[in-house]
Image: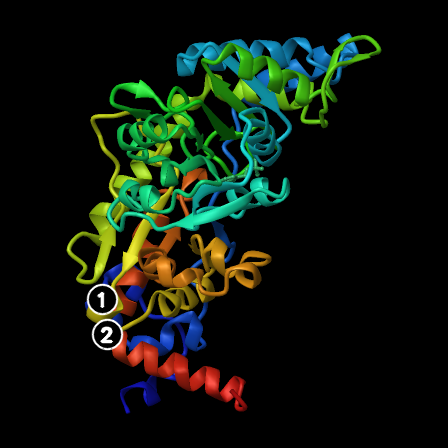
């Protein structure tokens, strides 16, 4: 067996710098960390390492807010951040909040959603939870295999007399088919919200994302393109909706001792806004790093059979925050999960997204055990998609090494897969 002598190879040869020929020639798959070789990276490389703006300007703002002793409750930094985001996105209202999940709950409640709301299952769980938390039923709709976003034709088929709205998700920051969804919402009398958690800084049809539908929700979580540690915002052109959300995020207080509405606590803190104001000044740098990484990955993996790419529309503004592969197992002879295991062993902490799909998580999988039957594209994507580390954690050298590992694993697909299977059998003999 080709691998036998490899197992005793004293050290990792040069495969990760010399390419697949070097790897195959100098010892082969036994030198992969999954099979006992030393990992390619001593420190783990993460997906979604935080983008942090200029530290001195951030610390200056933090000193300032400590001097002013105004830490939260619609402080000066929160107001400044809201005005700057309104200008940046081109909307009338930005309501900053403590995170996007609360922002989604508040936006959907303020928009009057009840009964059933159509959402993708191929999204982060918060898109569904924000509804179920309020006892609104998320009705999972399949996505378009090409865009990874809601398939408008299927949305229309899921509308019932109980449907009150649609929440589209701009997955990877790539826009939903807003024209088709707005048309459906208008014709059928539904509210249309967008979960734009991935899409801050991205445009669609020459307009910034944030201005579509009745309202859009951004996440400013640490792992997102632009962060405020934790945070989020709803943006809208609807005056009434904005006024309601401002009340709702502050317990319904309309003034001292005057509660006029049911509310919760969704406020953003001053220190979060200080982080946001600082990050906003450096957005172009975050994009430049992400874009260079995205292009390097594409160059390094070009032409690899069975591995396809999520491409960004370069005629629009993109934040390039996600480097996304789709692995077609029929062609590669190695599964997405096999590649993932190989990478993790090398300390490349790639991630499956949005695995296994909201409909396969609780409580939804108990409520709708057969939902998958109506979600063939979602089921397919959750088995194929792999998201690779990017941001400031990696540069061209790391990317070259990561891609060489992937190329090597794919070039020896059948062999790698067999060996992984044997190994897991040895580790878990009962299964
Ligand atoms: C991150 C994310 C959220 C939740 O955002 P938080 O600010 O962490 O609450 C919601 N939807 C999507 C698609 C996300 O990626």
Residue 431 in the image: above or below residue 280: below
Image disc number at residue 177: none
Q: Which mark is residue 20?
A: 1
Image quarter (top left, top right, bottom left or bottom right) of the N terminus: bottom left
Helix, strand or loop at label 1? It is helix
Nearer to us in this view, 409 or 145: 145
Location of residue 78 (image quadrant): top right
| Disc 1 crowd, CA 10 A, few/some/many (<14, 14-19, 20+) | many
Place of residue 229 in the rendered image (x, y in percent of width and height, measured from the top left): 61, 32
Q: Residue at x 45, y 13 (%)?
A: 237
Please determine whether, in this image, residue 305 is positioned above or below residue 338: above
Q: Is residue 120 above or below residue 177?
A: below
The residue lying toward the viewer, choosing from 301 and 263, is 263
Q: Is residue 174 above or below residue 206?
A: below
Q: Are marks 2 and 1 in contact (CB under 8 Å)?
A: yes
Residue 195 pos. (x, y %): 46, 34
Visible residue check, residue 393:
no
On the image, which quarter does residue 332 sit in?
bottom left
Spatial distance from mark 2 to mark 1, Cα to Cα? 6 Å
Residue under label 2: 24
């Amino acid at each position: 067996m080709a691998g036998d002598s490899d197992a005793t190879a004293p050290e990792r040869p040069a495969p990760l710098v010399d390419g697949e020929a070097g790897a195959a020639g100098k010892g082969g798959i036994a030198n992969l960390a999954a099979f006992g070789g030393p990992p390619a990276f001593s420190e783990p490389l993460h997906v979604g390492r935080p983008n942090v703006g200029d530290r001195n300007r951030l610390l200056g703002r933090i000193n300032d807010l400590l001097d002013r002793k105004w830490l939260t409750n619609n402080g000066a930094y929160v107001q400044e951040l809201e005005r700057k985001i309104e200008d940046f996105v081109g909307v009338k209202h930005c309501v900053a909040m403590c995170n996007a999940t609360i922002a989604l709950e508040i936006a959907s409640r303020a928009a009057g959603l009840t009964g059933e709301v159509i959402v993708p299952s191929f999204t982060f769980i918060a898109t569904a939870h924000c509804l179920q938390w309020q006892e609104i039923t998320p009705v999972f709709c399949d996505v378009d295999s090409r865009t990874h976003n809601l398939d408008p034709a299927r949305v229309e088929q899921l509308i019932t007399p109980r449907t009150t709205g649609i929440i589209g998700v701009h997955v990877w920051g790539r826009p939903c088919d807003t024209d088709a969804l707005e048309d459906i919402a208008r014709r059928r009398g539904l509210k249309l919200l967008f979960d734009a958690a991935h899409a801050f800084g991205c445009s669609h049809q020459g307009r910034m994302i944030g201005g579509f539908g009745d309202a859009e929700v951004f996440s400013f979580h640490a792992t997102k393109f632009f962060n405020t540690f934790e945070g989020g915002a709803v943006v809208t052109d609807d005056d009434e909706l904005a006024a309601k959300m401002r009340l709702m995020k502050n317990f319904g207080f309309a003034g001292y001792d005057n509660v006029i509405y049911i509310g919760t606590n969704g406020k953003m803190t001053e220190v979060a806004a200080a982080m946001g104001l600082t990050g906003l000044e450096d957005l172009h740098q975050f994009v430049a790093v992400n874009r260079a990484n995205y292009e390097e990955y594409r160059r390094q993996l070009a032409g690899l059979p069975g591995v396809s790419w999520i491409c960004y529309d370069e005629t629009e503004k993109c934040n390039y925050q996600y480097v996304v592969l789709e692995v077609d197992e029929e062609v590669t002879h190695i599964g997405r999960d096999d590649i993932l295991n190989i990478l993790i062993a090398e300390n490349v902490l790639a991630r499956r997204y949005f695995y296994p799909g909201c409909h396969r998580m609780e409580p939804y999988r108990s409520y709708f055990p057969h939902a998958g039957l109506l979600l063939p594209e979602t089921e397919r994507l959750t088995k194929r998609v792999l998201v690779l580390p990017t941001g400031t954690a990696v540069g061209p050298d790391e990317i070259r090494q990561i891609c060489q590992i992937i190329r090597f694993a794919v070039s020896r697909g059948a062999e790698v897969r067999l060996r992984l299977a044997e190994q897991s059998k040895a580790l878990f003999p009962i299964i």
